[in-house]
Image (cartoon, helix red, strand yellow):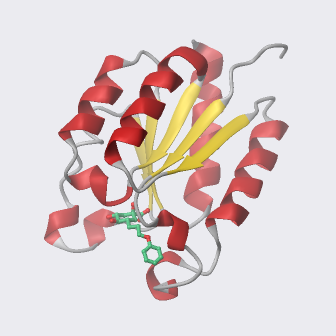
Amino acid sequence: MPDAKPIYVLNGPNLNLLGTREPEIYGRVTLAEIEVACAERAAQLGRGIVFRQSNIEGELVTWLQEAGDKAGAVVLNAGAYTHTSVALHDAIKAIAVPVIETHLSNPTAREDFRHVSLVGKAAKGVIAGFGATSYLLAIEAAALLANES
Ligand code: CA2
């Protein structure tokens, strides 16, 4: 598919620590390893990726706005901002490209404060609870949705 728009994979706060702490919750895979796996799966599906991580809420908002112009779809693990950020909710609402909320863990099975997702109220759908495989499932959903638009 010539000139297919890339899938943006955006990661929120503390996800840069993956593989170094709390392996019982988040596994031992690093974010760099997830990036490689996402790039491979996207390439199989005829797409490139733009993969980024930030601990800064506003930076994620800026990248969502950029994705609205440049991406075919967005895979978004907003980390803890998932549960708190009206700004991310509004940024998702403001762009026409589909956004797939993605989590390593299953927030619904965890503490009560993780049961609310402001991101999920704006996202196209949610994939959660499969560890690093959540990202690969989200890449597949993103590629399908990008092909539809
Ligand atoms: O399960 C997910 O992917 C989460 O988005 C991860 C967030 C959490 O706040 C969400 O409720 C669910 C936390 C990311 C923190 O990642 C760490 C990784 C290693 C060590 C410490 C934190």
Q: In which quarter of the image is residue 143?
A: top right
The correct choice, above or below, for 146 with respect to 11 in the image is above
Image location (x, y in percent) of residue 30? 64, 71
Number of numbered tags placed on the structure image: 0
Residue found farthest to the left:
112
Instruction: State ligand 1's quadrant.
Output: bottom left
Q: Which residue is drawn at 46% across and 38% down?
A: 100
Image location (x, y in percent) of residue 67? 52, 25
Q: Residue at x 59, y 79 (%)?
A: 19
Quarter that holds the N terminus? top right
Q: Residue at x 85, y 13 (%)?
A: 2
Image location (x, y in percent) of residue 61? 37, 34
The correct choice, above or below, for 124 with respect to 146 in the image is below
The correct choice, above or below, for 78 with respect to 49 in the image is below
Image location (x, y in percent) of residue 8? 59, 35
Quarter that holds the C terminus? top right
- Please state if 135 lies on the left or on the right of 48 as rendered: left
Q: Which residue is drawn at 15% across and 65% down?
A: 113
Query: Foreground: 16 or 9?
Result: 16
Query: Foreground: 41 or 61?
Result: 61
Q: Quadrant of residue 28?
A: bottom right
